[in-house]
Image (spheres, rainbow, N blue to C red):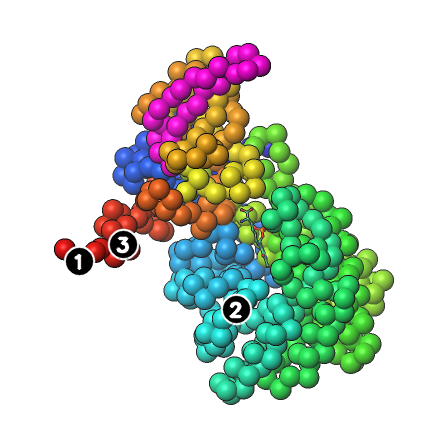
Amino acid sequence: MSVWSATVTRSEDGAIVVGGYDVRDLAGKFGTPLYVIDEVDMRARVSAFRDHFTAAFGRHGAKCDVFYASKSFLSSRVARWMLDEDVNMDVASGGELEIALRGGMPAERLALHGNNKSDAEMQRALEVGVGRIVLDSLDEIAVLDAIAGELGAVAPVMVRVTTGVHAGGHEYIATAHEDQKFGLSLATGAALEALRRVHAAEHLELQGIHTHIGSQILSIEAFRESAERMLRLRATFAAETGVEMPEVDLGGGYAIAYTPDAEALEARTAAFEIADAVADALAEAGGSWPRFSIEPGRAISGPAGMTLYRVGVVKRVELDEGGTRTYVAVDGGMSDNMRPITYGADYTAALAARESSAEPALSRVVGKHCESGDIVVRSVDLPSDVARGDLLAVPATGAYGRVMSNNYNALLRPAVVSVRDGEATLHVRRDTLEDLLSWDVAPDA
Ligand code: LLP
């Protein structure tokens, strides 16, 4: 499986070219580390989700909307792309909401998530007219009802359901099993109770139910199981109240390949298999077709992005089992990619400004932080002549990279640029030393 974004090629003298832009020029103009988004690739990914899910659900005479999960990567320019591509977005905080609005995304196309939304976040969402607020707890129902009442508004809401389907990769990215903080449990009856309360609330309008079962999901079976449980809940509620909720959201979690030997769940396969599974589940549970929606995040932003690093120290260490490992230290690390240290995530890397015919050497790409767990790529064969000054590219870093970055060791968070047809556009500027010092409140002279 290729881990490089759609427009990646090599120049005649061996440098990676992405979006028609030579990485040597990108590094020269914007510095390193640098997050680079291949605009053509990212737009193609989101339009593939939109088109395949529209076609697949359309075969059943039904509809499925795409909400890009902006937590995976967000800039106001990306919000604009999503609008151009005619998809909606989900936001998970007041901050994400403001960036999406700044990009011109109409509020009614936004869904607001969060397991612990503040009063201010809910109020702002109502004031700007967010299209759906996804309620995550029983407590929140009364709070939102009161806020909406004070504003003289009616809040469009969905209820986040914990279906008990345990799917996805690392424990920290599975989200619908019982013993975690998200949503309202199907098994204990909390979800049904929430629906009753929303239905009875004066200032809430029940649009439907939402679930998100986890991330890095490769198997359709988990989606099938979750759709079955969701549609049974919808039927139970309809039998009790006569209300057939109009919408069901099945969340995100479509797996991407971070390394060449890994698999991905392609939008096309996912769309047709999920639509068929949903049709079966609906036939079983009974009821009319609701409008479906999905929330892919990393499957849109992840493979479209790469990180460029500059190599510094290269060190060979002897291994107990014999042989050597080359430690290739780059100018970033766990501050710009938290995923290896957080989830043990694997990535790959390649020499970016040149090709080399030197013998491959077992290598580990590490950062410049004061921790031995500061690993960018655990294991990769790199040419044995990698040296100080080389550029390295790490593909598939477009999701949960910049958005989870931090200033550990007072490093400066990298910029994000997108490239297309030989043009580069800045989305997020690099932190400066002045930024860093301005956050620090100095003692009196
Ligand atoms: N919808 C909801 C409600 C979510 O909570 C998430 C992710 C998504 C959609 C998108 O999931 P995706 O398609 O991107 O897998 N920081 C972790 C991932 C945490 C995801 C949390 N929610 C990582 O780097 O893998």
What separation in Å lies between label 3 and label 2 (alpha carbons)?
Answer: 28 Å
Give the answer, above or below, for where 193 lies relative to 46.
below
Provide residue 227's location: percent of width, then percent of height. Answer: 74, 59
Can you say whether 173 is above or below 388 in the image?
A: below
Q: Secondary structure at mark 1?
A: loop
Single out the residue that lies furthest toward the left: 445
* Secondary element at image label 2: loop
Pointer 2 residue:
117
Using the rendered image of the protein, determine whether residue 304 is visible from the camera's viewpoint.
no
Residue in the image at 43% along x and 30% along y: 366
Corner quadrant of residue 213? bottom right
Residue 245 left/right relative to 336: right
Residue identified by numbered label 3:
440
Query: Badge 1 local density, few (<14 within 10 Å), some, or many (20+)?
Result: few
What secondary structure is the stretch in magenta mostly built from? strand
Is 363 situated above or below 253? above
Determine whether label 1 and label 3 are within 8 Å by CB. Answer: no
Query: Which quadrant of the rendered structure holds the N terminus?
Result: top right
